[in-house]
Image: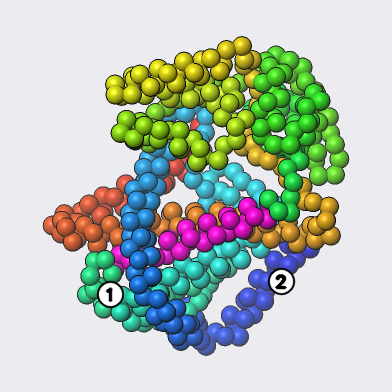
Amino acid sequence: MFDLYSVSVLIFITALVFALYKDRKNLERNSIMLLRRTERGKGLIKKIANACPFFWKWLGNAGIVIGFAVSVYITYFMIESLFKSITSETAVSTLSVVVPSISSTTSMGPGYLAVPFWYWIISIALLVVVHEGLHGIMTIIGKTRIKSLGWGVMAILPLAFVEPDEKALQKKSLVTRLRVYAAGSLSNFIFALIYLGIFSLIASTLFIPSGVSYAGTFKDYPADNANLTGAIINIDGYQIRNQDDLTLALERIGVNKTITVVTFNGTDNLTFTLQTTNPQRVEFKPDMFTDFVISLESNFPGTVKLLNSLSGLSETSTESWQYLTYEKRFWEYAKSTAASIAGDAEIHISEIERALEGRNEPGFIGIGGISAYHTLKDDYKNAESGISFFQGLLFFLFILNLGVGLANLLPIIPLDGGKMWDDLLKKYIPARAELITKILAWSVFLIIIAGFVIPFLK
């Protein structure tokens, strides 16, 4: 039996099919896509571009730097994720395809994330508009003609496109072409930050922290064995309003203690009894970023302290047993690899040891993906459904803009990241450019396939 949400999705799809059929004479079929070209919007793009050319050129130059940096990072991240997936005893899935669901709830599994349809369709529609819009602006700034623009669909996936005159664009300078290629992802990153800012503003203004939620439980740990559900609001008399409260309560309780956990499932309070166990050991694995931070600390003392202050972690978090233990391992590694700061590292290690003296090892109940659980203030209860939908939409707008922006910068043609590397290599090492581009593209493509397949084999 269909619920109201599923019915609304089916009505939308039916209306879309009807609208496309009615406008079929103006549609152009391109493989599995239906495109509708139009002149509307060209004037607006030109007007926006010509309003402040200096600003757009500056933004485009910044986009080039960000684009190459992110392209290197996302490629490194995928290689590292694949290595973890191969070496881990359990399945580790770091890649997911975002697909629409006719359900009003989000679900996920190996290799996929099913997003409620209305969140998905609205997010994709807004995403492609800003993505292609900035492509168009950079095309105009580069004094290149926009050949065509318009909208379309691929199945039910909304599309927008701005098609520059490719022949004219190839005659422009390398910087001009790179501005155009990098523009799409840059726009997605900018709007991801905007959506995150609005989301955070709403959360801090309309909601109050009322507990701790979690993404899931670890198999065979206390929370899993007790079938723990709902947001945690109380543990053995300790009121839990946020992650700091949870950390403090579990440290005071300690290991191998029987505790009573009270949760809220949205309508009722539930009570569970379970026993704390030893916490999972956070293995310290230094990577390229760790070495980079230590290098900065060697040349600019105080860098680590500055980064910690900018991390946004509360004082309770940075004084927790687990955080201090991890921090101690960091300084031990710094002491062993950077002789110039060995003395300072020894001081930090001694300070951490004094801070840990007499402290209990915190109890662990086996929950992961911990975040604050917020409830709406009483003054806004009448608008709860509307606020909840808008906040969910902002969250997925952030996730999808960030995800598409990152994926688009992978060094694979025809993605913009691939075009950027191809043009750069042709400029400086033309004899080997084509070979390097192909090796890069096939390597990353195989890494992506392996990233999806390996978790299913474990």
The answer to whether one can see residue 398 in this image is yes
The span shown in magenta is: 177-203
Q: Position of residue 80 (x, y in %)?
A: 39, 37
- Is residue 192 inside the magenta stretch? yes
Q: Secondary structure at mark 1?
A: helix
Q: Position of residue 288 (x, y in %)?
A: 35, 35
- Side of 156 relative to 251 (left or right): left
187 shown above or below 406: below
Q: Main secondary structure of the magenta part?
A: helix
Q: Which residue is mark 1?
A: 169
162 shown above or below 448: below
- Is residue 442 inside the magenta stretch? no
Q: Quadrant of residue 177?
A: bottom left
Quick one: which residue is furthest to the right in this view?
Answer: 268
Q: Nearer the viewer, mark 2 or mark 1?
A: 1
Indicate the amino acid at tag 2.
Answer: Ile
The answer to whether one can see residue 3 in this image is no
Q: CA distance from mark 2 to mark 1?
A: 42 Å
Disc with the residue nearer the chain's start (2 vs 1): 2
**Mark number displayed over residue 214:** none
Q: Residue at x 64, y 80 (%)?
A: 18
Q: Position of residue 283 (x, y in %)?
A: 48, 24
Q: Position of residue 342 (x, y in %)?
A: 34, 20
* Numbered-mark total: 2
Q: Residue at x 42, y 18 (%)?
A: 347
Q: Which residue is mark 2?
A: 11
Q: Secondary structure at mark 2?
A: helix
Camera-nearest residue between 88 and 424:
424
Q: Residue at x 36, y 42 (%)?
A: 76
388 shown above or below 23: above
153 shown above or below 210: below
